[in-house]
Image (tube, grey):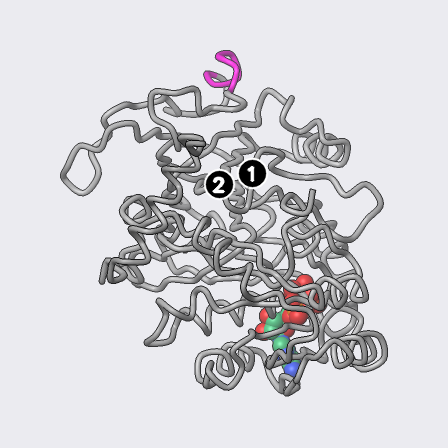
């Protein structure tokens, strides 16, 4: 019986990939244009093929465990040694455990470790920050083409573990350990945030954000030692009370030009009301050449979020999601623009977000994109948050956020695949 057309095409694509020498665009790590992504084969299907050979139960798996003793309530040691280690050992994991001694240590470890010594991956015990460090360490290696696909496991023990909760549906360390023992990988898009003037690139798996949230992230660092995870609440309240105005110039490239990629467009009225010249401009001139379909939004924004998955916070009762249509492997980013300024508007957004109604607000714009360029204007906070880490910009920093042309891998099965 002939195979269905879709399946036949996928097999042909995979066979082509396996017989071809891997073609990596050499400039991709520095000039992280999304267009590169379209030139490479479909990594998702390749990963699935490889995953099946990697999940033999009872097989010995050699991993490096990087444990951040300062994560969350500083309970990572208890979490790992008391709740998780024995489960992993019993199921055949051979682990070398290294505790981080300083901020940045996990990045140094993952950038220098001999990956062949730990062929089954690196397991992070901590929050999203430590996972981000490991990712950035892997991608700073000379062999980044291989390292990007090096499996990263997560035992959640931090202030927030949005990544593992959103992508794998796992919130507690014991379930995370069980998921690791079952084997398998979940392919995940990796995005890059480039500070254009400095030529510095930082990678992420969850989201990058600008405006109020980045400002809160910066302030929260002052309270890290005294307040632990509550530092975000205190910093958020303080920043709310002394709320500045944030002005940005934003250019984004929609994911599907010509199609209806705007999931939640601004209403015309609000559009006119909110932006100085926030008109949709087709055929914008970028770097001297016309690139079609770039859309420009200029003006005041309370916040800008660029999400790789739908970003469900692991803490809190309601677990609202910021970008409901975002998928971690869909090859696009979800952009949320919260237009305007002022405490009342911010408060309404926050309440609506808790109830997942924020996309109904007339000043919230939601669109699927390939990439976005963001320039803070005037005295606007010029930093940017990436997966809970703050990147400091200087003066007229311009940020560009886009996807990489290859996917990373998380240890553990995608719950969608299990269904
Ligand atoms: N030994 C250490 N001492 C101080 N800081 C550390 C240490 N190890 C790691 N860090 C830093 O702690 C930061 C937060 O780590 P992690 O994400 O594991 O915890 P967290 O409590 O969830 O924090 P966050 O909410 O900021 O992500 C990381 O960015 C890392 O740079």
Residue range in magenta is: 266-272
Element on which disc 2 rests = loop
**Mark 2 crowdedness (10 Å alpha carbons): few <14, some 14-19, many ≥20:** few
Give the numbered dot on residue 260.
none
Q: Quarter of the image containing the C terminus? A: top right
Residue at the far left in the pictured view: 288
Residue at the far front in the pictured view: 1
Q: State yes or no: Cβ of the residue under disc 2 lies below 8 Å from any atom of ligand 1.
A: no
**Image position, residue 397 (x, y; %):** 36, 54
The question of residue 181 being in magenta is answered with no
Judged by its main secondary structure, the magenta piece is helix
- Residue 67 lies left or right of residue 381; in this view the side is right
Element on which disc 1 rests = loop
Residue 5 picture quarter: top left
Q: Which of 187 and 55 is in front in this view?
A: 55
**Image position, residue 257 (x, y; %):** 34, 26
Looking at the image, is mark 1 or mark 2 nearer the viewer? Answer: 2
Give the numbered dot on residue 326.
1
- Observer able to see residue 188: yes
Q: Nearer the viewer, residue 166 or 316?
A: 166
């Amino acid at each position: 019986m002939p195979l269905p057309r879709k399946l036949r095409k996928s097999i042909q694509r995979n066979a082509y990939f396996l017989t071809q020498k891997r073609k990596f665009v050499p400039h991709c790590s520095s000039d992280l244009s999304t267009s590169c992504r379209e030139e490479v084969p479909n990594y998702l299907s390749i990963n699935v093929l490889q995953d099946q050979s990697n999940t033999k139960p009872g097989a010995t798996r050699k991993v490096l465990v990087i444990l951040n003793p300062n994560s969350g309530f500083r309970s990572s040691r208890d979490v790992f040694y008391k709740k998780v280690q024995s489960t992993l050992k019993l199921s055949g994991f051979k682990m070398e455990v290294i505790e981080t001694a300083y901020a940045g240590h996990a990045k140094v470890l993952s950038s220098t470790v001999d990956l062949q010594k730990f062929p089954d991956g690196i397991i992070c015990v901590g929050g999203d920050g430590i996972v981000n460090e490991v990712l950035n360490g892997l991608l700073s290696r000379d062999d980044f083409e291989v390292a990007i696909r090096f499996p990263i496991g997560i035992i959640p023990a931090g202030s927030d573990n949005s990544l593992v909760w959103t992508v794998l549906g796992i919130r507690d360390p014991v379930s995370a350990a069980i998921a690791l023992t079952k084997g398998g990988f979940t392919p995940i898009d990796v995005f890059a945030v480039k500070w254009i003037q400095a030529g510095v690139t930082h990678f992420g798996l969850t989201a990058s954000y600008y405006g109020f949230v980045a400002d809160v992230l910066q302030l929260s660092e002052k309270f890290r030692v005294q307040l632990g995870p509550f530092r975000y609440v205190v910093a958020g309240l303080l920043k709310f009370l002394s709320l500045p105005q944030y002005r940005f110039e934003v250019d984004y490239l929609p994911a599907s030009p010509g199609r209806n990629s705007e999931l939640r467009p601004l209403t015309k009225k609000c559009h006119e009301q909110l932006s100085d010249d926030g008109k949709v401009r087709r055929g914008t001139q970028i770097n001297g050449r016309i690139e079609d379909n770039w859309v420009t939004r200029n003006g005041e924004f309370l916040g800008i979020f660029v999400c790789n998955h739908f970003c469900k916070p692991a803490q809190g009762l309601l677990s609202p999601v910021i970008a409901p249509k975002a998928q971690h492997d869909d090859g696009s980013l979800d952009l949320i623009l919260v237009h305007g300024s002022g405490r009342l508007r911010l408060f309404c957004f926050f309440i609506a977000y808790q109830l997942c109604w924020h996309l109904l607000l007339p000043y919230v714009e939601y669109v699927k994109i390939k990439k976005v360029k963001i320039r803070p204007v005037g005295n606007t906070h010029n930093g940017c948050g990436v997966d809970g880490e703050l990147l400091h910009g200087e003066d007229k920093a311009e940020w560009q956020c886009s996807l990489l042309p290859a996917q990373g891998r998380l240890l553990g099965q995608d719950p969608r695949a299990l269904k």
